Image: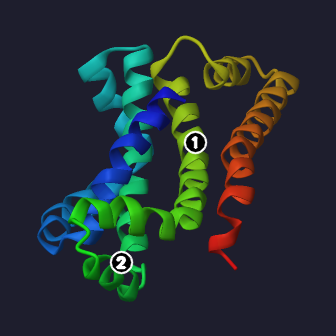
Amino acid sequence: MGAFALAGAMAVPIGLKMGSFRLVGAALEPVVDLIRYLPAPALPPLSIIWFGVGEKTKIFLLWLGAFFQLALPVADDVRRVPVEFHETAMTVEAPWWRRLTDVSLPAMAPTLVDNMRITLGWCWTYLIIAEIVAANSGLGFVIWQARRFFRTPEVMAGVVAIGFIGLATDQLIRVPHRPRFAHLTR
């Protein structure tokens, strides 16, 4: 969760700036796009070389998988905020940072929450890959060890546990979103 929170804390402000300022978007989007398309199974060997086997590698892989998957949708959501909203803010001489925090962010909040939920799902996939290849603990590690000894019930239990944990974390993000931002989606 720490790696996901770190990725979100970085991707949201960077995505806001990429979507709000053409120069920032033009400079960062090609790099973000390139890294976003790197195949997940190819990343653990590099991570192990850089960080060794353990928590640092898992955190890096999860951050890598979540940050680059989230930054571009945030930038796209900012671009979808109606121009009239920003024009209204400019008529009251709101500075650029207030337009981002008081106009763009609330207007894109429903889609931001959805993008966070989708990215969290990808983050779970990266976690399992990281634990299979670059860890000596965790559900992915347990599943991989059980697979080596043909313990199908343990593999299935691990897979089902991941599904339930993923569902629970998805609902943690989803539940607060509904009542607070319902008025924006009407």
Image coordinates for residue 182, horizontal then vertical, percent: 70, 67
Picture colour scheme: rainbow
Q: Amino acid at mark 1?
A: Thr
Quadrant of the rendering where the N terminus is positioned = top right
Where does label 2 land, which residue? 79
Callout 2: helix, strand or loop? helix
**Of residues 81 and 146, which is closer to you in this image?**
81
Callout 1: helix, strand or loop? helix
Q: Residue furthest bottom?
A: 84
Q: Earlier in the sequence, mark 2 or mark 1?
A: 2
Residue found at x 36% / y 64%? 72
Q: Are marks 2 and 1 in contact (CB under 8 Å)?
A: no
Q: Amino acid at mark 2?
A: Arg
Residue found at x 35% / y 86%? 83
Q: Is residue 81 above or below residue 53?
A: below
Q: Residue furthest right?
A: 153
Instruction: Please name which of the two marks, 2 or 1, marks the residue nearer to the observer.
Output: 2
Distance from disc 2 to disc 1, alpha carbons, whole Å, reads 29 Å
Image coordinates for residue 109, horizontal then vertical, percent: 53, 62
Residue found at x 26% / y 69%? 94
Q: Is residue 145 above or below residue 37?
A: above
Image coordinates for residue 106, horizontal then vertical, percent: 49, 64
**Of residues 178 and 36, which is closer to you in this image?**
178
Alpha-carbon neighbours of circle 2 within 10 Å: few (<14), some, or many (≥20)? Answer: some
Quadrant of the rendering where the C terminus is positioned = bottom right
**Of residues 110 and 44, which is closer to you in this image?**
110
Mark yes or no: residue 123 visible.
yes
Q: Residue furthest front?
A: 92
Where does label 1 land, which residue? 125
Q: Quadrant of residue 36?
A: bottom left
